[in-house]
């Protein structure tokens, strides 16, 4: 009878061990910083962003100059000329806002460019993580960089370097 109880307990423990889930962590920021293509893409996006920002600022400066000129000429202008100048200034300011929205808005050119350049890199990382997870039997892989609620995680379960190796970047 004792043997049956012990055997039953052992089988019960083995079944719980079989149901144990394996977890892993990655640090996406660390991985991306170690991928040269990502750094080049970031630099390219930064340059494009600066160029576009300069365009927007040039139009805003033009609107400010128009306003200063308007202020200095105000005494000499007829009511009709005042209205015309005010409309030109407003139009120029609106042009700057439209350009800013076109470049930097939620569906702007910078967003689209970032999406088109970053997506292939992110997909490559995702596929590497997926392959490692399938090979090692991980049920869950959490990104440490974006998971703010992780207070402590053992470095033993961090597979960031494995991901880099899988992608062909030794670390």
Image: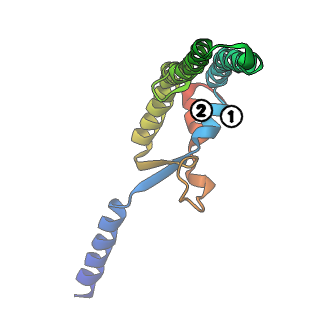
Give 75 or 153, whichever is nearer the viewer: 75
Task: Mark 1: give few (<14), some (14-19) or many (20+) Cα within 10 Å.
Answer: few
- Residue occupying image coordinates x 55% and y 25%: 104
Residue 29 drawn above or below residue 95: below
Horizontal side of residue 168 vs 10, given as left or right: right
- Residue occupying image coordinates x 23% and y 81%: 4
In this figure, which colouring scheme has been used for the structure? Answer: rainbow
Q: Residue 15: give its label.
A: none
Q: Residue furthest bottom?
A: 1
**Picture coordinates of residue 88 (x, y %)?**
59, 14
Horizontal side of residue 4 vs 133, given as left or right: left
**SS at badge 2:** helix
State yes or no: discs 2 and 1 in contact (Cβ < 8 Å).
Answer: yes
Horizontal side of residue 47 vs 24, given as left or right: right
Q: Is residue 115 visible?
A: yes
**Distance between mark 2 and mark 1 Cα atoms:** 7 Å
**Picture coordinates of residue 65 (x, y %)?**
74, 17
Give 118 or 51, whichever is nearer the viewer: 51
**Picture coordinates of residue 107 (x, y %)?**
45, 25
Q: Is residue 117 visible?
A: no
Residue 99 drawn above or below residue 14: above
**SS at badge 1:** loop
- Quarter of the picture containing the N terminus is bottom left
Q: Earlier in the sequence, mark 2 or mark 1?
A: 2
Residue 72 drawn above or below residue 127: above
- The residue beneath circle 2 is 164
- The residue beneath circle 1 is 171
- Residue occupying image coordinates x 75% and y 20%: 68
């Amino acid at each position: 009878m004792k043997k049956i109880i012990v055997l039953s307990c052992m089988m019960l423990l083995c079944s719980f061990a079989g149901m144990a889930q394996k977890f892993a962590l990655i640090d996406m920021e660390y991985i991306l910083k170690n991928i040269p293509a990502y750094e080049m893409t970031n630099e390219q996006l930064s340059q494009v962003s600066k160029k576009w920002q300069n365009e927007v600022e040039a139009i805003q400066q033009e609107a400010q100059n128009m306003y200063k000129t308007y202020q200095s000429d105000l005494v000499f202008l007829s009511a009709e000329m005042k209205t015309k100048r005010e409309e030109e200034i407003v139009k120029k300011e609106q042009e700057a806002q439209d350009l800013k929205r076109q470049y930097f808005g939620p569906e702007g050119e910078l967003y689209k460019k970032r999406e088109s350049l970053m997506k292939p890199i992110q997909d490559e990382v995702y596929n590497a993580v997926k392959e490692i997870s399938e090979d090692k039997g991980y049920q869950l892989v959490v990104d440490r960089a974006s998971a703010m609620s992780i207070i402590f995680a053992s470095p033993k379960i961090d597979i960031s370097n494995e991901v880099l190796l899988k992608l062909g970047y030794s670390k």
